[in-house]
Structure formats: structure tokens, C-alpha cells
């Protein structure tokens, strides 16, 4: 195949992927269902489950320890939203993600292997180690 | 490896590392993990163009190891490594296939595969399929930032190609 043809095919593919993904991002962002349940996972295990529809305010810290590395994330639940308000990870992306109450994007702290997912209901989560609050 | 080349590669590593550290000090573009300009990739692509795949691999690995130490976290090492290696492999392959005229396409594909590599690593580490929710936004940002770094490389290449030691 000629270089120009291959290049053109690639460019077209990139363009199409860009368009499709852009549309997907918009759908994810604007059509995201309002979530009611927040699930906090660390290292693949479900640690906490919260019902965000309850009007409660809460603040707590999740410790992270692996080998000699220790860290923490302080999580806040306020006005039906959940977010990480303080962390000692170097990139602080989790803090920049702010407070969320929608299921569009999960909040993640990659260095501390923490992930907060929000779902509409609690039907599709079945884990034995659940501490329900 | 002669002294001249050793010095040159050391210099490239220094430049890449400086860009990498400076960029990580900037506030994030979007509050999504993995979205960043990836300016250090300019150096990787540059070394691939002006040197060889082996040179680029040297500079990339050194930059990732030193960069992770300077950033103070070894977890980011795994993400950088998976993204960086996949990116370099794809760029090297496309460079063979497309030649140096389509730098922007090569750079975009590199950025796309960098993010895919990181996402796969995140999936492996977090063991949660929900990281793939980020795929569309990561692809959009990779295409945009890849085009930007590709243009930077192209402009740099045009200007200092003649100055390169043979």
C-alpha cells in the first residue's frame, strides 16, 4: 500500500474516532443519570456503599498502605454529592475532580488505587465485604 | 555507543525530563486522570526521527525512571511505562510505514495508544472495568494533544534538522 493511501486512511479513521468519541463524551456528560448510590473501591475491593439520596453530611478518611508507601484520601459527602476533598497523592487529580452526584465519570485516585463509582441503583453490585452506612 | 552519541542522548533525556517535570507542575487541563499535553513526547518522537528506535527507547526509559523518582511516586511508573512503551512502538511502526512527512498522524496515533496503554494498566491495577468509561474522553484528548505535539515536533524538525550532527 502506498504511503499516501495509508496516511489518508489513518487520518480518516482518526477523524471518525474523534467525532464519535466527542459525541459519546457529550452524551456521557449531559445525559448521565443522577446517581443515588456511591461505591468506594480500593484495590478492586468494595469498601463502602453510601445512599446519596439521604440528606447527610459526612467526612472520613481512607488510608492507603502498600509496602513503605502510606497515604490517605479524605472523602466528603454533602448535599447528595460525593468527592475527595483532601489527599496526599502527588497529582491531586482526585481533588480536582470535585464533588459529583452523577454517574457520568467515576472519581479516581490512581496513586492510591481508589475509585468511587456512582450508580442509579444497588441492584448490580453483589459483594460480600460490604459495609453499609 | 561513542561519546558524541552518549552526550547527545543524555542531552535529549535532560530535555525530556525537564519538560516532563515542568508539565507535571502545571494545573491539569481537565480534571480527568490521564488527560495531559504530553509535551515530553515531542522529544521521544524527535529522537525517533533523528536517531533510531533504540535511541528513542533509551531516552524514553530513562525519562520515565527518573521522572517517576522526581515526581516522588512509583505508582505512576507503571502507568508511564505502559503508556510510553505502547506509544513508542506504535510511532516506530507508523514511522516505518508512513515516513517523516506525516508526523502529525504519527504523533496522534502515538498519543492515542499512550492513553490506551495507561487505561489498560489502570484496569489491571484497579481491577475495575469502570475505568473504560474514560475511554471516549481520553481518545478525544489524545487526538487533540497528539495533534498539538505533532505540530510542535514538525516545526522543531524543520528548523533544526540541518544542525543535527551526522
Image: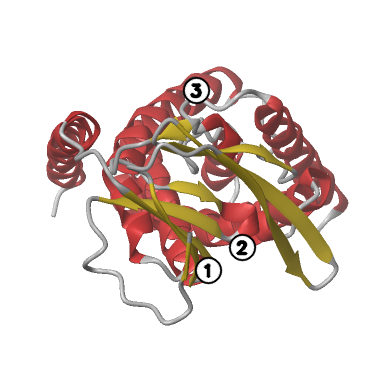
Q: Disc 2 and disc 3: Cα gap in Å?
A: 27 Å
The percent coordinates of residue B134 (x first, y second) are 34, 47
Residue shown at the point (58%, 60%) measured from the top left:
A113
The percent coordinates of residue A132 (x first, y second) are 45, 65
Q: Chain under label 2?
A: B
User: Dot 3, how many residues are within 10 Å of its Cα: few (below 14), some (14-19), or many (20+)?
Assistant: some
Label 1 belongs to which residue?
B125
Q: Disc 1 and disc 2: Cα gap in Å?
A: 9 Å
Residue shown at the point (76%, 32%) measured from the top left:
B18
Look at the image and tell me in which quarter the N terminus of chain A lies: bottom left
- Secondary structure of residue under mark 1: helix
Q: Chain under label 3?
A: B
Indicate whether B65 appears above or below B144: below
The percent coordinates of residue B91 (x first, y second) are 42, 50
Coloration of the structure image: secondary structure
Q: Return the residue nearer the eye: B1 or B140.
A: B140
Specify whether B7 is left or right of A1. Answer: right
Q: Is residue A60 visible?
A: yes
Residue that protrudes farthest toward the front in the picture: A55
Label 3 belongs to which residue?
B152
Q: Earlier in the sequence, mark 3 or mark 1?
A: 1
User: Dot 1, how many residues are within 10 Å of its Cα: few (below 14), some (14-19), or many (20+)?
Assistant: some
Same chain under badges 1 and 2? The reply is yes
User: Quarter of the image holding residue A28?
Assistant: top left
Q: Chain under label 1?
A: B
Label 2 belongs to which residue?
B78
Q: Earlier in the sequence, mark 1 or mark 2?
A: 2
The percent coordinates of residue A9 (x first, y second) are 12, 44
Amino acid at each position: 500500500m502506498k504511503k499516501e493511501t495509508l496516511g489518508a486512511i489513518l487520518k480518516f479513521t482518526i477523524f471518525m474516532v474523534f467525532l464519535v468519541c466527542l459525541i459519546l463524551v457529550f452524551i456521557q456528560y449531559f445525559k448521565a443519570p443522577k446517581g443515588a448510590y456511591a461505591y468506594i473501591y480500593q484495590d478492586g475491593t468494595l469498601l463502602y456503599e453510601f445512599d446519596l439520596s439521604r440528606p447527610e453530611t459526612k467526612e472520613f478518611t481512607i488510608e492507603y498502605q502498600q509496602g513503605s508507601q502510606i497515604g490517605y484520601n479524605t472523602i466528603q459527602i454533602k448535599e447528595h454529592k460525593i468527592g475527595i476533598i483532601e489527599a496526599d497523592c502527588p497529582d491531586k487529580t482526585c481533588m480536582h475532580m470535585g464533588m459529583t452526584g452523577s454517574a457520568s465519570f467515576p472519581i479516581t485516585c490512581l496513586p492510591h488505587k481508589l475509585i468511587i463509582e456512582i450508580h442509579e441503583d444497588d441492584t448490580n453490585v453483589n459483594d460480600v465485604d460490604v459495609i453499609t452506612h | 555507543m561513542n561519546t558524541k552519541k552518549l552526550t547527545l542522548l543524555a542531552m535529549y533525556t535532560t530535555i525530556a525530563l525537564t519538560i516532563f517535570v515542568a508539565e507535571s507542575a502545571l494545573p491539569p487541563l481537565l480534571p480527568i486522570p490521564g488527560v495531559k499535553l504530553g509535551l515530553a513526547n515531542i522529544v521521544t518522537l524527535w529522537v525517533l526521527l533523528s536517531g533510531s528506535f533504540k535511541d528513542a527507547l533509551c531516552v524514553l526509559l530513562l525519562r520515565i525512571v527518573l521522572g517517576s523518582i522526581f515526581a516522588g511516586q512509583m505508582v505512576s511508573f507503571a502507568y508511564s511505562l505502559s503508556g510510553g512503551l505502547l506509544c513508542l512502538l506504535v510511532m516506530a511502526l507508523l514511522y516505518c510505514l508512513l515516513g517523516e512527512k506525516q508526523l502529525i498522524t504519527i504523533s496522534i496515533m502515538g498519543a492515542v495508544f499512550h492513553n490506551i496503554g495507561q487505561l489498560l494498566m489502570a484496569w489491571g491495577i484497579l481491577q475495575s472495568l469502570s475505568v473504560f468509561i474514560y475511554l471516549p474522553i481520553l481518545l478525544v484528548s489524545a487526538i487533540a494533544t497528539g495533534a498539538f505535539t505533532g505540530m510542535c515536533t514538525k516545526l522543531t524538525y524543520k528548523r533544526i534538522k540541518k544542525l543535527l550532527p551526522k
